[in-house]
Amino acid sequence: MLPGISISTAIAEKESIYEILQENGLPLGIFPKGVKEFSFDGKTGRFSVFLNQSCDAKYETELHYNANITGTIGFAQIEDLSGISAQELFLWFPVKGIRVDVPSSGLIYFDVGVVRKQYSLSLFETPRDCVAALRENEIKLLGETVFSRSLRNVVILYQKDRQILEDTCTVLVSKSLA
C-alpha cells in the first residue's frame, strides 16, 4: 500500500466503480453513466474503466471520455490518468490527475498539465449522461475527415473540394464569434 494513502480493498466483482470512488473520498460523478465494466487492483490502486463508446459530458465545461480510461486511485485523488480530456474554449487538454481539496472547501482540481482547473465539487456528485462523441483524430469516413470544433456540431469537410472547406471554416468561425 502506498504511504499516506488509503486505498479500498474492494473486489471489483462485488462493488461498482462508483462505490470504489466514494470509499476513496472521490465523487461518483468523475465517471459518466455507461460504465460497462472495470478492473481495480486494491493493492496498487490501478484501475481501468470501459465505457460503451467515447462520449462527452457537460459540467461547467465539457469533458471528453475515451472508451477506455486508466489511472491510479488514492484517497481523494486519481493520478496517472489517461482517457479524459477537458475543453477550454476550442482547445482540449488531457486530464492527467484529479484531486479533491479538503471536502469542506467544496473544490475539486483537474490537472491538465499547464494548469489545474478548479471546479465546484457539487458538479460531480452524480454520474452524468454521456453523449456519443466524434473527434477529429478518431474517425475517417471514405476519404472524408470528420472535424469537430464543437462536439455538438459535427461538420464533414470534404478534402477534395477546397471551396467547401473554406466556406465551412468561415461558418464555424462566424458561429464561434457570435
Image (tube, rainbow, N blue to C red):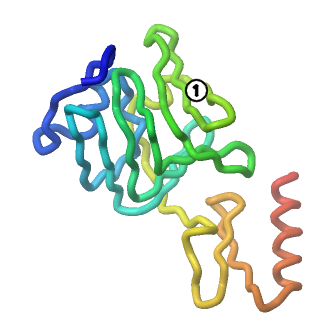
Q: How many marks?
A: 1
> Is residue 59 among the parts visible in the rendering?
yes
Residue depicted at x 49% and y 34%: 97
Q: Residues within 10 Å of mark 1 (few under 14, many from 20)?
A: some
In this rendering, is residue 157 above or below 50? below
Left or right, 69 with respect to 44, comes to right
| Residue 162 in picture, x, y percent from top left | 86, 85
Q: Secondary structure at mark 1?
A: strand
Residue depicted at x 27% and y 55%: 36
Asked where in the image residue 71 lies, by quadrant, the reply is top left
In this rendering, is residue 120 above or below 158? above
Asked where in the image residue 136 lies, by quadrant, the reply is bottom right
Judging depth in this view, the residue of 109 and 178 nearest the camera is 109
Asked where in the image residue 103 lies, by quadrant, the reply is top left
| Residue 87 in picture, x, y percent from top left | 65, 46
Q: Amino acid at mark 1?
A: Tyr
Determine the residue located farthest toward the top in the rendered image.
104
> Is residue 62 among the parts visible in the rendering?
no
Residue depicted at x 55% and y 69%: 138
Indicate the quadrant containing the N terminus: top left, top right, bottom left or bottom right: top left
| Residue 150 in picture, x, y percent from top left | 68, 58
Left or right, 103 with respect to 17, comes to right
Left or right, 89 with respect to 5, comes to right
| Residue 119 in picture, x, y percent from top left | 58, 26
Left or right, 52 with respect to 13, comes to right
Residue at label 1? Answer: 119
